[in-house]
Amino acid sequence: MSRTNPSVSVLGLGAMGGVLAQTLLQSGCAVTVWNRNAERAAPVVKAGAILAVDVQSALQASDLIVICMIDKATSETVLSSLGPTFDLGGKTLVNMSTGTVADVERLARWADEHNARYLDGGILCYPKDIGAAKTAILYSGHPQAWEEHQLTLKILAGNPHYLGADPQACTPTYLALYAFYFGAFAAWLEGTVLASSAGVSVDDFKHLSSIMTDMLVDGIDTAADRITAGEYGGEQASVDVHVAGQEVVLDALVSAKVPHASTDAYLSYCRLAQAASMGDQDIAAVYKAMQP
């Protein structure tokens, strides 16, 4: 179990890392910080954090080390500078930087070779939402490290999700969720611009958008159930029906001279299903057509 008023080191004090450190401080944690540009540490030091003189001192100061740099490759470069004999004495590294699965594999190996327990992390919010009850951060990696530090990590996000012992489970799931989010956001931007061509204000379209976000949640639930059960009957709306409808949407976007990359992408996926003779099946069948 996590200790009362635990100590945490935060490496990286950019827009996200600085908020992580501030949130831990506000919860009563003893926080040590390090940043390649020490001037970035001034706000959190003023709030009560201890500034480590170097990265080695920051790692030695706490049992829990949170890394949030521009990317995992940068954090790997910083850690590798410590040399092959540096011993972390069983401390826990939580790397919340963005990166690739290959980055995670190397970092987890580095942690193991330097007597550390590794957790990979994926932050699913902007800095303004750190510390909120609804905010989610994904984790995967060392089970005992997660068990020991989960209460402290929950300070940063009230809705954490642990994906298991494989440290490589977090990053592709995190990236998949952002692919979904930004794809949907791009489609919303297309719609907002199209609606504005008809005189609908952004604020009005924002309020109307909840109709479709509710429909999207229901659509995801239905599609997931169909995919899991392998039931692709097209009685609600087949792939062919979706293609016909989206061609009308595309025509409206083109006529209004609105960019339409997300609509093009959706149509291209539907046509994959048509090419695989799934045009009469439910839109969930596109999942099958998209498999590599």
Image (cartoon, helix red, strand yellow):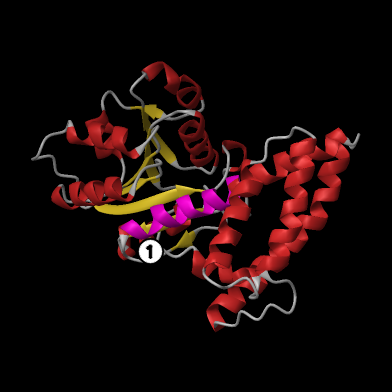
Q: Residue at x 31, y 63 (%)?
A: 166
Q: In the image, what residue type sits under mark 1? A: Glu
Residue 42 can be seen in this image: yes
Quadrant where the image shows the C terminus: bottom left
The quadrant holding residue 211 is bottom right
Q: Residue at x 45, y 49 (%)?
A: 122
| Left or right for 212, reference 111 | right
Percent of width and height locating residue 22: 52, 34
Residue extending furthest right?
199
Q: Nearer the viewer, residue 180 or 240?
A: 240
Magenta span: chief secondary structure: helix
Q: Which residue is mark 1?
A: 147
Quadrant where the image shows the N terminus: bottom left
Q: Is residue 229 magenta?
A: no
Residue 135 can be seen in this image: no
Above or below 225: residue 168: above
The quadrant holding residue 34 is top left
What are the residue bounds of the magenta stretch?
Answer: 168-182
